[in-house]
Image (cartoon, rainbow, N blue to C red):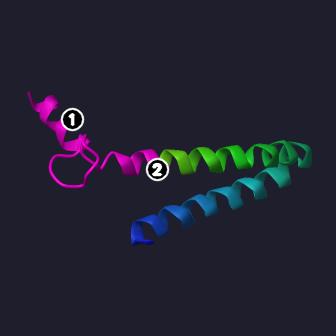
Amino acid sequence: SLSGLRIGVIFNALGAIICTLTIVFIVGWKLSLVLLLFTPLIVFSGIVQGQRLSNTKRNPTGSTKGISWIEKGGMVSVQ
């Protein structure tokens, strides 16, 4: 499901892409073509990063109950 935070991140990314493309088209159309070639790679890496960050909420055994990786890291940093 799309939570408010996730929708905000999506709109932020779309806004950044639109603004970047607009500025690049104004500066130089050749540079914009190069940028458009790398857009799928940037989108794919963003999706992978989002999936990895969502996996940090799970605990080491894979379930969502108990201590998460973030909590374990906090416990180590306090010690």
Residue 4 x/y as whole percent: 41, 72
Quadrant position of residue 75: top left
Residue 25 image position (x, y, % from top left): 84, 54
Give the residue pinned by disc 1. 73
Q: Spatial distance from mark 1 to mark 2, Cα to Cα?
A: 19 Å
Q: Residue at x 25, y 40 (%)?
A: 60
The answer to whether the residue labelled 1 contacts the one labelled 2, judged by CB atoms less than 8 Å apart, is: no
Q: Which mark is residue 46?
A: none
Report the front residue among 37 and 61: 61
Q: Is residue 18 above or below residue 7?
A: above
Identify the amino acid type marked 1. Gly
* Amino acid beneath label 2: Gln
* Quadrant, the N terminus: bottom left
Is residue 23 part of the magenta span, yes or no? Answer: no
Secondary structure of residue under mark 1:
helix
Residue 79, image quadrant: top left
7 relative position to 73: left or right: right
Q: Nearer the viewer, residue 14 or 69?
A: 69
Determine which residue is flagged by label 2: 51
Question: Taking 28 as reference, is 17 left or right?
Answer: left
Q: Is residue 24 left or right of residue 75?
A: right
Q: Which residues are magenta?
A: 50-79
Mark 2 surroundings: few (<14), some (14-19) or many (≥20) residues within 10 A: few
